[in-house]
Amino acid sequence: MGKRHISLKDLATELGVSISSVSRALKNHPDISPELTTKIQKLAKEWNYTPNPLAMGLLRQQTKMIGVIVPDIVTHFYSSIISGIEEVAKQHGYFIVIASSNESMGKEIESVENLLKSRVEGFIVCISQETNNFEHFEQLISNEIPLVFFDRICETLEVPTVIADGIDATKKITRHFYENGCRRIAYISGPEHLNISKNRREGYLEGLKECGLKFDPRYLVECNLSTEDATRATQQLLNNSELPDAIFGLNDTIAFAAMKEIKKQGLKIPDDIALVGFTDEFHSTVVDPSLTSVTHPTLKMGREAAKLFFQIIKNEKNFNKQIVLKTELVVRESSTKS
């Protein structure tokens, strides 16, 4: 392995087991079989594995700081979640240090590194839309640094998470459109590798099926969550020979861009095209027409994420490692046809 520091991940990859199994075996945890424990400890000795001193130092220092990384700190969605995290952290005598990835994986990696240098005890994270490589989080796990994901998560890592029920939410949207007479229902999704994109797409397809509607691939488009690309996606939908009579987006940013483009093309909302957003930002109530949207229990999401963090810190056993929160469809003018 050369002179590079050997990590728990290296041992796990070599033996084809999970990082947590390696960590437990090195501590002679009773949940790991004696045979596997012996095998892991033998390899660790052969490869001269030693615990990462920085990680161990972080865990022992108890700096009472939690690193919180979000895609942006401007929207109400994330600021409300941060408030929930901060509320629970304060109850435990901790405070939070916030970093924004600005939807950049490079900035996210940099934020992890900078927060580690600031001696945070662990992390609560919503991944950026660009993040499709998770080595920076795998290193935290291998060094036993507490980590919790919320909303956008990595489904392949064994990390406690708090998410919204996106499948149920988009089924509600599809059913709402159908009950208002819509039959050509379009969805503007986000990057396919994001869990929220996959879940909401699944709910959309299930919703169509439950309403007896056939899926038409012309009405499912993807964008990168920027206003510009959401506009491009809307134009693609409006260029179909048969216009959609309903559109909803992965988030409100997409819905606002769609609203602007629909109006620009001389179409009326909701008479020509009904519209629904997702995340229910403040602007939903002040645009014309007011935007129907899915609201998240954001404060609760932040509180639950922080509670999971402290369950890790306290080394509690058998706690619920994935919390799924229900959403609510808030109906306004943009989706109710007269």
Image: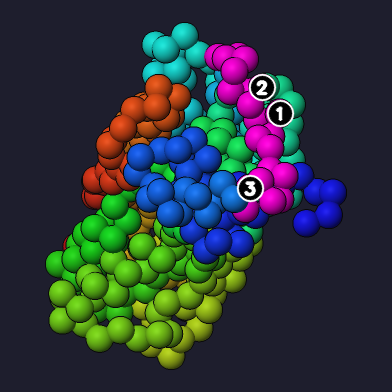
Q: Secondary structure at mark 1?
A: helix
Q: Residues within 10 Å of mark 2 (few under 14, many from 20)?
A: few
- Vertical relation: 303 (above or below) 159: above
Side (left or right) of 34 relative to 180: right
Q: CA distance from mark 2 to mark 3?
A: 21 Å
| Residue highlighted by disc 1 | 54
Q: Which mark is residue 95?
A: none
Q: Residue furthest bottom?
A: 241
- Vertical relation: 261 (above or below) 205: above
The amino acid marked with disc number 1 is Leu
| Residue highlighted by disc 3 | 44
Write the residue at 31% across / 32% down: 317
- Vertical relation: 170 (above or below) 43: below
Mark sitting earlier along the chain (1/3): 3
Side (left or right) of 168 relative to 264: left
Colour scheme of the picture: rainbow
Magenta residue span:
43-64
Total labels drawn: 3
Contact between marks 1 and 3 (CB within 8 A): the answer is no
| Residue highlighted by disc 2 | 57
Residue 204: x and y in percent read: 30, 69
Contact between marks 2 and 1 (CB within 8 A): the answer is yes
Residue 263: x and y in percent read: 47, 64
Q: Which quarter shows the N terminus?
A: bottom right
Residue 12: x and y in percent read: 56, 55
Residue 331: x and y in percent read: 24, 49
